[in-house]
Amino acid sequence: MDIDDILREVDPTLHEVPQEKRDLQDLTRAWVAERSAPELLNWPSGELFERINDNIKRQIERVEEMTGDMDPKTNFALIVIQTELERFKYLVRSYLRARLAKIDRHALHYLSTDELRARLSDMELAYATRHQALLHNHYLSSFLSSFPPALQNLNDTAGNIAMVDLPDLESAVFIRLLADSMVSGRGVDTDNTFEFQESDIVILRWSDAKPLIESGRAELV
Amino acid sequence: MALPLPPGLTQPEVAFLAEMELVTIVPRQRLESIALLSGSTPPLRPPHRADLPLWLALLLKKQRRANIVPPPWLHPTSLSEIITRETKDNPDAFSDPPPPISRAHPSQPGRARRLAESEAGLSPPFVPSCTAEAPAGYLPYHWLEVAEALLAHAGDDMPVAAGEVRSLLRDLVEVRAAKMRSSTGTLEMFGGGLTSLRGVGAMELAESRGFVLGVVDGVRKLGASAEATRREEEEAGGGQGASDDDESDEDMGL
Amino acid sequence: MPMYGDLGNKLVQHAKRTQNLQHLPAYQTELVRSVAREVRDLDREVASLLEPFQDSFDPAAEQATACTLLVNHMSMRRNKRCLLAYHRTRTDKLEELVWSGSDLLDLAGQQAGPGAANSMNGPGDSNSSSSLSPQEEDYVRQYGDLLAAYKGHWTDIDLTGSLEPPRDLFIDVRVLKDAGEIQTEYGAINLTKNSQFYVRQGDVERLIAQGYLQKLG
């Protein structure tokens, strides 16, 4: 018996948030964060998207089964189910495309180290690798193959001019504190550390916000 | 391009998010539980109230299957009180957001602590701040979107004429828009790296996001070399802050 | 005699212009070739400058040569960046078109803009009026396959669907003119004048546009 089980016995309300509801919360927060952060965030762990994708598939099958049943009661349930289904599909679609846009824009960067590659899902990694290969091939066949060999690669940084485009990790973001926290932010004139309260909305650089987001003390808004 | 949208939620996206807020309805018809992706809806039995996400409540309302109970903060007395606070008591800041749920039980410290754990990481639109149980006198994060949706589709469920609520809301929008504009004064001070907008609403953020972040990023880029110099000096001087003279010199350079 | 880098600048200007255009202007075959040739010329010059020194070039002792070498290196790299930027701007545009569902025929048929010189070509002469290079046509095909493969993992959510948040999936409509029977997911609905229905917006959009139905609320 672990601590969660003990707590649940003491207070049954503790874990009453059901999985489905938690998944929607996680999906929604992942979507808001990915739409707001200047760089690609981690692909969620815990099979969140596998679960959501399976549920969407099952729900679509249910809609198909219920369709044609002209009982007005079923009919209204069907309207509700389909409306919600569209909302879920939109969330997943917008989330995946926000990620793809970042991956496309800075593919060489996200493919450059194991740590960065680990942020991508397997499918995204396959997509990014192949996309990059297509681009490189395209450059080669269009002009690069006529270059001297030393100039044919795409990630050289000689002369301090990087060919790899990097996301701007210093761009400003809005965050909301999820717990009272000390927040440090670097500015042009001074660097500051202030105590902020839960629910506070703060503007700061993404690089300063990132540790707070990763530790769950704040979220992007 | 996979996503032709700027970073940060757009206004339609914020409105979509706000439709996940829970609101309280009074069903006019029985409705059995529906197994949704986000969990099963409660069975609806008139006249027992139930809390549902706004999008579903609006669907029921449009079908005349339910009435929506406006959240207490949307009542005219509450709105007037907030306007007074925003104009007279504290004309420079947005009024406070609703108190966190975890602190709502000060008399039961043990319970509050555990709630804090179970609610940890929960935030709008997933904390109930627009239900009939929500406190009056505080604007929740999605106040404007929820208020507009309710006025547009459930105006007849308002305790007073919808026009009265609408006019108070308009006043509030204006008072707060002026604060958002004047906060750009603070943004120019972003030299300090942290700016707080406590109490701001989601739609208000979305409306001014491009401008605000543009100013902040602009200040950073213009001051990049000054900042780099300051950091070098601080490193050399053992962490001493740059003097005021240095700063004003750099400002002149911009 | 033009300075090294002038041609590269031209390419960047083309790329900048392309970003703001709805259509894709004609591929600058000649310009691309010239900029690439410039890189090879510069590289040859570097090689011939270095040749007398074998492997023992000392920049401190040969400052004038070192300076020329540096300029040549910078110019080559600049040209490379210009070429990359030009091609990347165009592939971005091509990818955008693939996402929006255009196929290669739509793209290849694009003129280089209204009133362009190649509008002299007769209609149907799509090869000579294509604004895409043959390499770009290959790229569109391959990227289309790649996108289809990725989309295939997410068939249920329709990855290329709308990025506008869904609103009013179902709407109330009033029938203005008898429109007979239509098939919806819930079976047939008989649209007789003055009747009212709650229907999926997508099922009746055409009937609304044609004036048979009126959207309510």
Image (cartoon, grey):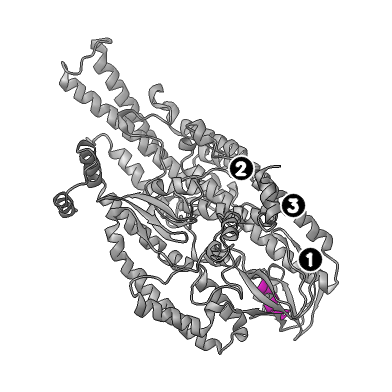
- Badge 2: how crowded within 10 Å, few (<14), some, or many (20+)? few
Farthest residue to the bottom: give it.
Answer: B161
Q: Nearer the viewer, mark 1 or mark 3?
A: 3
Do dots 2 and 1 share one subunit? no
- Look at label 1 and name its amino acid: Glu
Per the model, the C-alpha gap separating discs 1 and 3 is 18 Å
Residue at figure coordinates x 69%, y 67% from the top left: C202
Q: Is residue B247 left or right of residue C206?
A: left
Q: Is residue C139 above or below residue C101?
A: above
Q: Which residue is mark 2?
A: A45
**Residue C200 in magenta stretch:** no
Q: Is residue B159 above or below residue A211?
A: below
> Disc 2 on helix, strand or loop?
loop
- Look at label 2 and name its amino acid: Ser
> Disc 1 on helix, strand or loop?
loop
Bounds of the magenta span? B56-66
Q: Is residue B31 above or below residue A152?
A: below
Q: Which residue is mark 1?
A: C185
> Disc 3 on helix, strand or loop?
helix
- Look at label 3 and name its amino acid: Lys
How would you classify the magenta stretch by its main secondary structure? helix
Q: Is residue A89 above or below residue C154?
A: below
Q: State the residue in front, A124 or A4.
A: A4
Quarter holding the C terminus of chain C is bottom right
Q: Nearer the viewer, mark 3 or mark 2?
A: 2
Query: Could you tell me residue A115's position as x and y percent?
Result: 50, 33
Q: Chain of mark 2?
A: A
Query: Could you tell me residue A94's position as x and y percent?
Result: 57, 54
Determine the image quadrant of residue C34. Answer: top left
Q: Chain of mark 1?
A: C
Query: Could you tell me residue A73's position as x and y percent?
Result: 82, 72
Q: Which residue is mark 3?
A: A57
